[in-house]
Image (spheres, grey):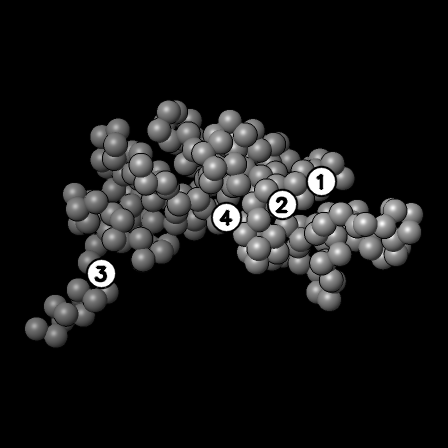
Amino acid sequence: MKRRKLWAGFAGLAAVVIAGVTTWTIQSESAAPPDSRAPSVVRASQNPDVLLETALLQMQKFHDAEGATRTYRRILKLDPHNKIAWYNLGVLAQQNDNTADAREAYENALKVDPHYASALLNEAILLRPSEPDRAIGLLERAIAAEPGAATAHLQLAQILAERNRDAEAAAEFRRAVEADPSLRSQVPEDFQDSVGSSPTSSQERSTR
């Protein structure tokens, strides 16, 4: 089965990167006793923002999902209300088809921020096959939080179409394409008329 694309995997991490901070020393256990480490390294190892940067490097540069998972759990020991750490734990679990852990992580992120659109969307994708009604509710919440979230509109449209709610589906497909024209190719043929003509098609007709 083709795995659905997760929304904004590791979204928001770039916003917490601290310029000029070197994090290589906190990616592995130090061989020296903790008391002998430099104070700046000790402070860095206890700083959730620096650890978020470390996790980003572990994923993007080293492709070390297990290491990133450990780093996120370390962050949550320091800051149990860190929604980015909870969200990215959910992304990692979802990528590994660990649906129970993914759902728990997204729910924890949403306890911190009930309007966290990325967590709402990814949990909806997770629940879409088994709990479509709950997925619809989550997508509606994501859209309320970010009305221009094209992927949320697309996912909602697809579920509505599957449930034969064609008028509502057509409206959501149209909103998805208005927000992101590149999604037009993902609109089913039966709903292409509802999203209007592509700019290219319109230009071609105008030159005839």
Q: Give the number of the mark in front: 4 or 1.
A: 1
Badge 4 or badge 1: first in the primary sequence: 4
Q: Nearer the viewer, residue 151 or 126?
A: 126
Which residue in the protein does label 3 denote?
198
The circle on residue 195 is none
Task: State the separation of the CA atoms marked 3 and 1.
Answer: 48 Å
**Label 2, on which residue?**
67
**Residue 1 shown left or right of residue 82 in the figure:** left
Residue named by callout 1: 74
In the rendered structure, which disc, 4 or 2, sits on the residue that comes first in sequence? 4
Q: Are marks 2 and 3 in contact (CB under 8 Å)?
A: no
Question: Can you tell which quarter of the image residue 22 is in?
Answer: bottom right
Horizontal and vertical percent position of residue 36: 91, 51
Residue 48 location, x and y as percent? 73, 47
* Whole-number angstrom distance, CA of label 4 to CA of label 1: 19 Å
Secondary structure state at the residue bearing disc 1: helix
Q: In the displayed structure, does residue 177 sit left or right of residue 138? A: left
Q: Of the two numbered discs 2 and 1 on the same chain, state the one appearing first in sequence.
A: 2
Tell me the amino acid under the disc marked 2.
Answer: Gly
Residue at the farthest right position: 35
Ranked by sequence position, the earlier of labels 3 and 4 is 4
Q: Position of residue 182 (x, y in %)?
A: 31, 57
Q: Confirm or deny contact between disc 3 and disc 1 (CB under 8 A).
A: no
**Residue type at numbered disc 1:** Arg
- Return the mark for residue 9: 4
What quarter of the picture does the N terminus occupy? top left
* Gap in angstroms between the C-alphas marked 3 and 4: 29 Å
> Circle 4 sits in a helix, a strand or a loop, which is it?
loop
Q: Residue furthest bottom?
A: 207
Nearer to us of marks 3 and 4 is 4
Badge 3 vs badge 4, beta-carbon distance below 8 Å:
no
